[in-house]
Image: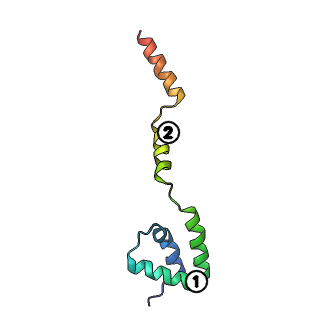
Amino acid sequence: MNTIRCSIVEDLLPLYIDGALREETAQAVREHLSACPACRNEYEKLAQTLTLPSAPDLQEEDRRRSRPSPALKRRSLWRCLRLF
């Protein structure tokens, strides 16, 4: 078993939570977390904050971004009216 330092595990935690580590590296992180209460505590805190929004939430956010603001609508309307 290769032991890895806490500082390395802390750097790897976001990737571990996202499932982006190779299995070999993920296994090393799991082993470290099982033996290190401080890193396990950090993992639990980070896992709660690093959750991705669900697909419907992302779609709603995209819709909000693509809608023009009321101020932009008014400016566009005035520009169109000046043409007539």
Residue located at (49% from left, 80% from top): 30
Horizontal and vertical percent position of residue 15:
45, 69
- What element does badge 1 sit on? loop
User: Which amino acid is tagged 1?
Assistant: Cys
Badge 1, how many Cα within 10 Å: few under 14, some, many 20+? few
**In-front residue for pair 70/75:** 70
Outermost residue on the bottom side: it is 1
Left or right of residue 73: residue 24: left
Q: Which mark is residue 51?
A: none
Residue located at (50% from left, 49% from top): 57
The answer to whether residue 8 is above or below residue 46 is below
Q: Is residue 5 visible?
A: no
- What element does badge 2 sit on? helix
**In-front residue for pair 9/60:** 60
Q: Say how many tags the image has.
A: 2
Q: Which residue is mark 2?
A: 64
The answer to whether residue 34 is above or below residue 18 is below
Badge 2, how many Cα within 10 Å: few under 14, some, many 20+? few
User: Which amino acid is tagged 2?
Assistant: Arg
Residue located at (51% from left, 54% from top): 53
Horizontal and vertical percent position of residue 22:
38, 75
**In-front residue for pair 8/63:** 63
* Distance from Cα at disc 2 to Cα at disc 1: 43 Å
Q: Which residue is mark 1?
A: 36
Q: Is residue 49 visible?
A: yes
The reply to whether callout 2 and callout 1 are in contact (CB within 8 Å) is no
Horizontal and vertical percent position of residue 11:
50, 72
Residue located at (46% from left, 66% from top): 18
What is the quadrant of the C terminus in the image?
A: top left
Which of discs 2 and 1 lies nearer the camera? The answer is: 2
Q: Earlier in the sequence, mark 2 or mark 1?
A: 1
Outermost residue on the front side: it is 56
